[in-house]
Image (cartoon, helix red, strand yellow):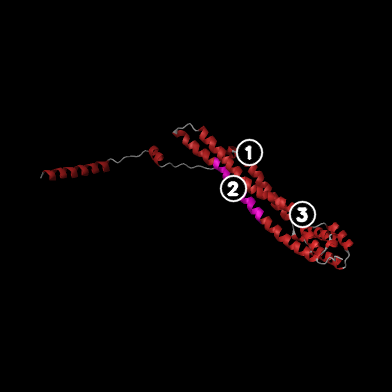
Amino acid sequence: MKKIKIFFIFICTIFLANISFSQNPIKQSPQNSSMIYPQKTSSLNLKEVFMASPIIYSTLFIMSFVSFVILLFTIFTFKKKDIVSKKTKENLKKYLEEENYEEALNYCKNIKNLLAIMISSGINARKHGAQHIINTIKSEGKRATASFWQRISILNDIAIIAPMLGLLGTVIGMFYSFYDINRSIDSLSALFDGLGIAVGTTVAGLTVSIIATIFYAILKFRIVKTLNIVENEAISLGNLINTQ
C-alpha cells in the first residue's frame, strides 16, 4: 500500500511538471537564437584576397599571361602550310629528279622553311652516301626545331613552378595567421578568415598550372604531328638525291 502511494505521488509530480512546462515554455531571445544558429552571409572580397599576397598573385598572373602568349604565338607561327607547302615539295622534287642541286640549294635559301632547310643539308651531304643523307636530314630537323621545343618547355616550367609558388603563399599566410593570434575566442574568426584568404594562393597556383599543362599538351601534339609529316616528306625527297 505504501509503495502504491509513492508511485501515485511520483506520477502526479511528473504530470504537474509537464503542465507547468507547457504553460511556461522557454522563450528564446533573438540574440540567443543567433548564437545557436548563426546566420552569417559573407561575400568574397577579391581586393582583400589580392592584397593578402600581392607579389605572388602578380607573379601567377604574369605566368598565366605568358602561357596565353606562347600558345597564340606558336599557333600562328607554326603552321603546316608554311612548313611543308605543296608548292615547295613539288619544286624541290623537280630539282632533285633533274639533279640540279645548285638550283635546289638556291631555292632552299630563298624560301627558308623547315623542309627546305632539311633538304639543303641532305644535298650538302650527298657525297657521303644515302644513309648519311637521311641521318643528316633527321639531325637538321631536330636542330631546326629546337627553338619550338624550348618555347613550349616554358609552359612545362610554369606548370611546375605555379603550384609551388601558390603553396608558398599559403604557408606564409598561415604562418602570419597563427603568429598574430591573441589566443582568445574573439580572434578565432579572424584566424579562420586569414586561413581562407591564405588558401587562395594555392587555388590560383593550381589553376595556372592546369592551364599551362593543357596548353603544353595541345602544342606538343601539334608540333609532333607536323614534324612527323615534315620528316617523312624530307626523307622521301632525300631518297631522290643521287650520291654519285
- Identify the mark nearer the N-term, 1 or 3: 1
Q: What residue type is labelled 2?
A: Leu
- Is 129 on the left or on the right of 166, as rendered? right
Q: What residue type is labelled 1?
A: Ile
Q: Which residue lies furthest to the top in this view?
A: 182
- Is 73 on the left or on the right of 177, as rendered? right
| Mark linked to residue 143 | 3
- Identify the mark nearer the N-term, 2 or 3: 3
> SS of the residue at dot 3?
helix
Q: Is there CB contact under 8 Å for labels 2 and 1?
A: no
> SS of the residue at dot 1?
helix
Q: Whole-Å distance between the Cαs marked 2 and 3?
A: 33 Å
Q: Position of residue 94 (x, y in %)?
A: 85, 67
Q: Which residue lies furthest to the bottom in this view?
A: 97
Q: Where is residue 237 in the image (x, y as percent from the top left)?
A: 80, 65
What is the quadrant of residue 27 in the picture? top left
- Is 43 on the left or on the right of 3, as rendered? right
* Viewer-nearest of discs 1 and 3: 3
Q: What residue type is labelled 3?
A: Arg
From which residue to which does the magenta span run?
A: 198-217
Look at the image and tell me in which quarter the N terminus lies.
top left
Q: Name the residue under label 1.
A: 55
| Mark linked to residue 206 | 2
